[in-house]
């Protein structure tokens, strides 16, 4: 027990000595009555030098009142929308958009024009299959009839229903939304920003401010951490002595290091001039490169077209067309083709370049469209579902 008593005495003496060594600007410990009131009311404290300190964890009653005022002002601005013409212009504009969507998109484009467009699409594909005499070509028109019928059964009701919904939104939905949105927003802001949040700030101030006001130490510049306690920036203009000191220091800086700053500015201008010249040169080179590449591509295409037109190449192209060398087939057999080119006497580099040329100028193919890589079987029910899913 004696040991703990002496430890306490030692700590007290050390604390007293530390307090005695505080600089004059930090003299005194407890807040004055005026500073206590400032802390409770504003959450800030002013020292004898007229410097304000903001205490982070003490919002103050002023903050609560300010929040309440701002909340109710914002709620009032929301309610004022009912007497401003912008709300009614928005109702008219958005209702017109709904009516336009109902007629232009749902009725005209989707239903009236979409129906014959779908029939032309299905019958056109059927005609292509008949002309090409693909396997089962005699089923092309019945299949197209099934596709068009299923689409019509879905398209017309969907288009009319969507139009009815759009008209209903324009007649009732848009006005109802604008009739309630400002009032609901005002009630929300007034409740939470104007009442609940300021009440929370007030309650916390009531809990935390009195203990700190009676037990807290006077703030000073040496005890400011920039987070828990911050010095409030002075927004008033400087006094004559402060301005004179600042001007004197600025004049000294200009006299001592002004020439070096001038050198830095000159170097920056020279560097920018050199960079500008380099950028101009890069643009010229890029333009020259683009022009040269375009000329090469034009000559390349002309050479390919003239080669295809040679009579001795016709049989080779016809053989390639029968094989249907599609893009996917070329990609799948890339290494095999490259190996065959090497066996023919080409180097690795020449073989790689030949592959690129084959991809750029693919051989002719009798296949009218790209074959799917993962073809699924179909039936009338599955195709009907596909027709509905791709409806547009």
Image: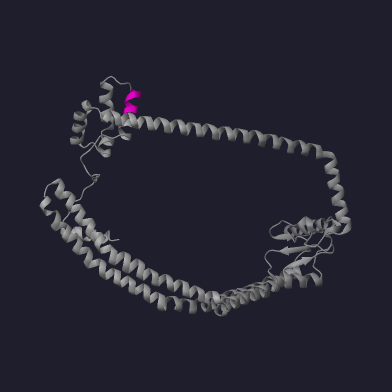
Answer with left or right where residue 239 lies relative to residue 307: right
Answer with left or right where residue 278 lies relative to residue 49: left
Residue 137 vertical placement versus 306 (above, below) = below
**Residue 286 percent across, percent down from the top left:** 51, 34
Answer with left or right where residue 21 lies relative to residue 368: right
Q: Residue at x 28, y 66 (%)?
A: 112
Most common secondary structure along the magenta stretch: helix
**Residue 189 percent across, percent down from the top left:** 57, 75
Who is closer to the viewer here, 10 or 385? Answer: 385
Who is closer to the viewer here, 236 or 4? Answer: 236
Split into 4 quadrants, where in the image is the N terminus? bottom right
Q: Residue at x 28, y 27 (%)?
A: 338
Q: Residue at x 35, y 24 (%)?
A: 349
Residue 377 seen from this side: no
**Residue 185 percent across, percent down from the top left:** 53, 75
Residue 303 vertical placement versus 193 (above, below) = above
**Residue 354 percent across, percent down from the top left:** 32, 28
Q: Is residue 191 magenta?
A: no
Q: Residue at x 24, y 62 (%)?
A: 116
Q: Is residue 353 magenta?
A: yes
Which portion, as a residue range, is magenta?
Answer: 348-354
The colour scheme used to paint the residues is one colour
């Amino acid at each position: 027990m004696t040991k703990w008593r002496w430890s306490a005495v030692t700590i007290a003496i050390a604390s007293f000595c530390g307090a005695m060594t505080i600089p004059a600007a930090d003299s005194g410990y407890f807040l004055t009555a005026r500073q206590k009131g400032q802390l409770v009311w504003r959450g800030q404290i002013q020292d004898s030098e007229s410097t304000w300190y903001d205490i982070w964890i003490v919002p103050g009653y002023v903050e609560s009142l300010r929040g309440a005022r701002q909340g109710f002002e914002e709620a009032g601005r929301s309610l004022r929308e009912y007497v401003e013409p912008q709300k009614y212009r928005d109702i008219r504009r958005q209702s017109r958009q709904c009516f336009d969507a109902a007629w232009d998109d749902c009725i005209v484009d989707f239903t009236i024009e979409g129906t014959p467009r779908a029939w032309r699409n299905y019958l056109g594909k059927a005609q292509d299959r008949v002309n090409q005499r693909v396997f089962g070509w005699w089923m092309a028109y019945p299949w197209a009839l099934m596709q068009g019928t299923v689409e019509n059964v879905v398209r017309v009701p969907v288009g009319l229903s969507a139009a009815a919904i759009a008209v209903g939104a324009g007649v009732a939905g848009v006005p109802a939304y604008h009739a309630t949105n400002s009032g609901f927003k005002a009630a929300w802001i007034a409740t939470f920003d104007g009442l609940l949040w300021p009440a929370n700030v007030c309650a916390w101030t009531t809990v935390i401010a009195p203990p700190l006001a009676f037990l807290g130490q006077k703030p000073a510049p040496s005890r400011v951490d920039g987070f828990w306690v911050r010095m409030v920036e002075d927004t008033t203009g400087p006094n004559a002595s402060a301005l004179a000191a600042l001007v004197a220091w600025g004049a000294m800086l200009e006299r001592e290091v002004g020439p070096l700053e001038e050198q830095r500015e000159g170097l920056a201008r020279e560097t920018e001039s050199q960079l500008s010249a380099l950028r101009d040169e890069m643009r010229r080179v890029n333009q020259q490169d683009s022009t040269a590449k375009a000329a090469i591509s034009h000559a390349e295409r002309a050479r390919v077209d003239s080669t295809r037109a040679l009579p001795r190449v016709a049989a080779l192209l016809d053989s390639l067309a029968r094989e249907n060398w599609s893009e996917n087939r070329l990609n799948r057999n890339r290494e095999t083709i490259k190996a065959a080119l090497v066996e023919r006497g080409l180097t690795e580099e020449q073989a790689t370049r030949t592959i690129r040329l084959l991809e750029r100028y693919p051989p002719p193919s009798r296949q009218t469209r790209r074959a799917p890589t993962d073809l699924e079987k179909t039936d009338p029910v599955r195709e009907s579902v596909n027709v509905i899913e791709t409806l547009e």
